[in-house]
Image (cartoon, rainbow, N blue to C red):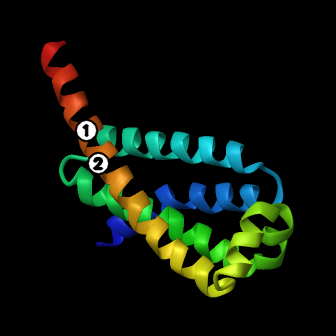
Amino acid sequence: MKGLARIILALSLPGLLLSLLGIFVLSRRAEGALWLALWALTAIFIARRTIEGPLILGFLAGFAQQVWAAAAHQIFFGTFLEHRPDEAAWLLSSGGRAMEAFSGVVTAALSGIIVGILSLVAFHATKLVKRSA
């Protein structure tokens, strides 16, 4: 279990970095593109390094990435609102921090599902490529 926790932590820390960049530097569009790239890279890493269970490992890694992002958004809430005025208007009109926390949980679950499925697909694709080689 210790090894699994280390792997999930290592795979999720880029999510913390990306969320901090999104709060302080990146535009919404650039951050979205980088999240897609991070999910794909996470799935490829899991597919190449895991022996079994890529779906669960992918889900946990994707979920943890977004937990870091939600935590960063809560800690730097004021800065996040300043940097993203379009999202700030929506967030403040629909519950502020509570809505950000709720959407963070939903996003974490969706991210986990996406990374889990991508990991499973990449895992089976690598098996097919190895067989044909």
Question: Which residue is at the front of the view, 109 or 21?
Answer: 109
Does residue 114 appear left or right of residue 38 in this picture?
Answer: left
Q: Secondary structure at mark 2?
A: helix
Residue 58 in the image: state x and y as whole percent: 34, 55
* 3D distance between C-alphas at marks 2 and 1: 6 Å
- Residue at (26, 60) in percent of width and height: 56
Label 2: how many residues lie within 10 Å, few (<14), some (14-19) or many (20+)? some
Q: Residue furthest left?
A: 131
- Residue at (70, 42) in percent of width and height: 30
Does residue 18 appear left or right of residue 40 in this picture?
Answer: right
Q: Is residue 7 visible?
A: no
Residue 90 got which mark?
Answer: none
Residue 95 in the image: state x and y as whole percent: 65, 85
Is mark 2 in CB contact (under 8 Å) with mark 1? yes
Amino acid type shown at disc 2:
Ile
Q: Secondary structure at mark 1?
A: helix
- Residue at (28, 72) in percent of width and height: 1
- Residue at (25, 29) in percent of width and height: 126
Q: Is residue 66 visible?
A: yes
Q: Is residue 65 above or below residue 43?
A: below
Where does label 2 land, which residue?
117
Q: Is residue 62 above or below residue 131?
A: below
Quadrant placement of the C terminus: top left
Residue 121 got which mark?
Answer: 1
Residue 35 in the image: state x and y as whole percent: 57, 48
Residue 13 in the image: state x and y as whole percent: 57, 60
